[in-house]
Amino acid sequence: MMTELLFSENFIEGRDWERKNYNLNTIILKEGQHSGKVFIILQGRVRITASVALEGRSIRPGFKELGPLDIFGELALFDATPHGATVIAVSEVEVAEVDARRLVKFLQCHPEIGCRFYRYLVEVLVARIQGTNQKMLSLLAWGLKSHGYTNYLD
C-alpha cells in the first residue's frame, strides 16, 4: 500500500512528500511536540519510546521497532494533538515525510487509493491495539503476582 501511495503519478515527491535521512540515534519525532506529518519508513529501522514516571524518575522504555514500509505519526491524519511517543533511528534511516493535510486532500481526491490506504491503516492500528492490550494484561498479571495477589489470576 505504501509504495502504491508514494509512487502514484498524482502524489509527487518534492510537492506532496519529501525524502529525509536520519543518522543512528537521531530523534525523528519527539513526544509532546507536533509535526503535522505522517512518516513512512523507506529504509532502516526506528524505535518507538515514551516517558514513564516510575518512583519519581522518568524512564523511556521502547515499545516497538518499525522497519521498511511501516508508518508512524499517522494520528496526525485525525487530530492536531502532540505526539504521544518519541521515535528514534536505530540505524541509518530514510523516511518519506508527508504533510498530513496534503495526504488527506489527496486521499479525498483519489478515493480508490484512499479506501485501500484507510483499510491498511485500520489493520495497522488494530494490530497495535491488540499488541498493547496483550502487553498491558501481561504487566497487570506481573504486578498482581509481585504483590501477592495471585488469587486474582485464573
Image (cartoon, rainbow, N blue to C red):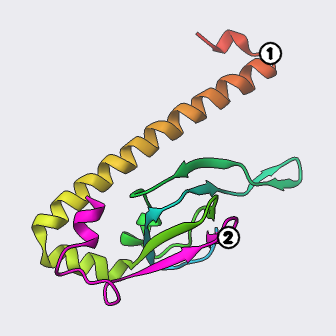
**Residue 118 in magenta stretch:** no
Residue 103 percent location from the top left of the image: 29, 77
Q: Amino acid at mark 1?
A: Gly
Quadrant placement of the N terminus: bottom left
Is 44 displayed left or right of 103 in the figure?
right
Is 47 displayed left or right of 40 in the figure?
right
What span is colored magenta in the figure?
A: 1-30
Residue 142 versus residue 49 in the image, above or below: above
Q: Label 2, on which residue? A: 26
**Label 2 crowding class (10 Å Cα cut-off): few <14, some 14-19, many 20+?**
some
Residue 68 percent location from the top left of the image: 43, 57
Residue 23 versus residue 71 in the image, above or below: below
Q: What secondary structure is marked by label 2? A: loop
Residue at image location 58% in from the left, 34% down from the top = 135
**Label 1 crowding class (10 Å Cα cut-off): few <14, some 14-19, many 20+?**
few
CA–CA distance in space, label 2 to label 1: 42 Å
The quarter holding residue 114 reads bottom left
Residue at image location 75% in from the left, 18% down from the top = 145
Residue most extreme to the right: 56
Is 117 displayed left or right of 131 in the figure?
left
Residue at image location 64% in from the left, 58% down from the top = 90
Q: Amino acid at mark 2?
A: Thr
Q: Nearer the viewer, residue 38 or 43?
A: 43
Q: What secondary structure is marked by label 1? A: loop
Q: Label 1, on which residue? A: 148
Residue 38 percent location from the top left of the image: 42, 71
Q: Nearer the viewer, residue 136 or 60?
A: 60
- Of callouts 2 and 1, which one flags the residue occurring earlier in the amino acid sequence? 2
Residue 86 percent location from the top left of the image: 63, 64
Numbered label tally: 2
